[in-house]
Amino acid sequence: MKKDYSTVWGNCLSVIRDNVSAANYETWFTPIKPIKLENNILTIQVPSSFYYEWLEEHYIDILRKAIKWELGSEGRLEYNIIVDSGSPEAKSINLPPSNKKEVINPSIYMPIDINRGQSEDMPNPFIIPGLKKIKINSQLVESYSFENFIEGSCNRLARSAGYAVANQPGKTAFNPLFIYSNVGLGKTHLMHAIGLRVKSQFPEKTVLYVTAEQFVQQFVDSVKSGSTNDFQHFYQMIDVLLVDDIQTIAGKEKTQDIFFHIFNHLHQNGKQLVITSDKPPVDLTGFEQRLLSRFKWGLSADLQVPDYETKVAILKKRIYNDGIEFPEEVIDYMAYSINSNIRELEGALISIIAQASLNKKDITLALAKQMIDKYVKVTTREITIEYIQKVVCDNFGLTPDIINSNSRRREIVQSRQLVMYLAKKYTKLSLATIGQACGNKDHATVLHACKAVNNLIETDKLFKSQVEKIDKKLKI
Ligand code: ADP
Ligand code: MG
């Protein structure tokens, strides 16, 4: 006797009813409509992809049992999802039974294809849309990996928290992980690194990187097309949600509202959130209090301007990746003179490389200085006392530690005095500050040093020529 779909589903429901609570039955099973039974495949219609996801995640076993009971071990279940619940004539799509994985652009937030997880050699023929995951385009940039993210004291906390989160998304206390800093210091890079690592460690997890601006745009579009439910459900299906530059939703109440609900849903379900911002939560304005308080639930970590060593390491990594020969002194100079952010450091590097290769010039200190003057904000190209120390040290084969010590050895004293003299000449620092930077000396010592160097220049030809050489190097 041929069974009809409503009888089959009716029988399934009676099995299910005995196995789930009344409230859950009401919420998750009564809205389902059976729509056809063909080739032992029962198709049921669910109100949204979220339902479908939820059923798969929480009721797969009982569904499997019920279908087996009714249709035998060859039986299958297929879902039909109502795409636009807002419009009167709800349109449905069939989930193709193929194995095909399709990448869905997140701007089309309605998943239309699932990985059914079927495979020929699976011993169990009983494959209710095994699906596990909907494949979406995570929008991650491959090169923004942990591997390419240089660690330094400027980013240690944020980096290690990010790494921990990537290894155990949703399971650490860092949820949300809130990363903040000024521009160009690595927020976006670190966020992508987290996403990439999650994907490689947990391929079954759904990761999505989205800028807050994109989020706003998608939300506005969904309002226009009456599909905000789908918008919300789509986001609630994500396992690791990375929202970049959250400050751009300041003052946007409706967006904040929906983000609040998405946030709660994900957080309650142990999903991971990573948020970046140009300010710490306490300094954000134009945000609902309830949202700000949630930002503070996990860990807030900032990224600082990198120190000299980190800048050198970043430059070297880039140069190494690009396979280019680069003189050390140019790297040093760049690391000393660019103090704004890493993006400018990289911008200068790219322009130097471009200039050198376009004009077939060698990469020299002079070229670097010229490029930095041109491309980096003028204020950042200042001769710093650290750079002066570096050049003096290189010239005499000493280290800053030795120069700044209290040693009375003549060449060390003279080098230290020379640093003070050049710092007075090239920086706007006060005598006291110069003294402090040279191993906690007082302003009188600096004044004395300047006089001593002037005297030496007049009396000692060799010393004079050394000073001229260093001076030239600083000034090019
Ligand atoms: P933000 O999002 O804070 O404005 P980005 O993540 O866009 O900054 O970083 C700017 C540039 O600096 C990117 O090209 C990025 O790869 C690079 N960068 C930032 N931090 C690091 C780091 N620690 N190691 C290597 N590169 C970095
Ligand atoms: Mg960014």
Image (spheres, rainbow, N blue to C red):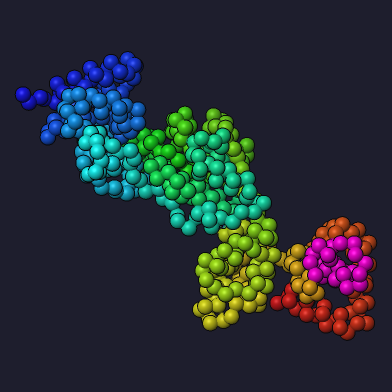
**Quarter occupied by the N terminus:** top left
Asked whether the viewer can see residue 261, the reply is no
Position above or below: 232 against 398:
above
Q: Where is residue 83 in the image (x, y as percent from the top left)?
A: 26, 36
Q: Position of residue 456 (x, y in %)?
A: 91, 78
Q: In this view, does 149 lie to the left or right of 227?
A: right
Dominant SS in magenta: helix
Report the residue at 86% width, 80% height from top: 463
Instruction: Give the residue furthest to the bottom.
Output: 461
Report the residue at 53% width, 82% height from top: 360
Q: In this view, does 179 lie to the left or right of 8?
A: right
Position above or below: 213 against 129:
below
Give the extent of the magenta segment. 398-427
Q: Where is residue 78 in the image (x, y as percent from the top left)?
A: 21, 34
Q: Which of 422 and 54 is in front in this view?
A: 54
Report the residue at 30% width, 38% height from top: 131
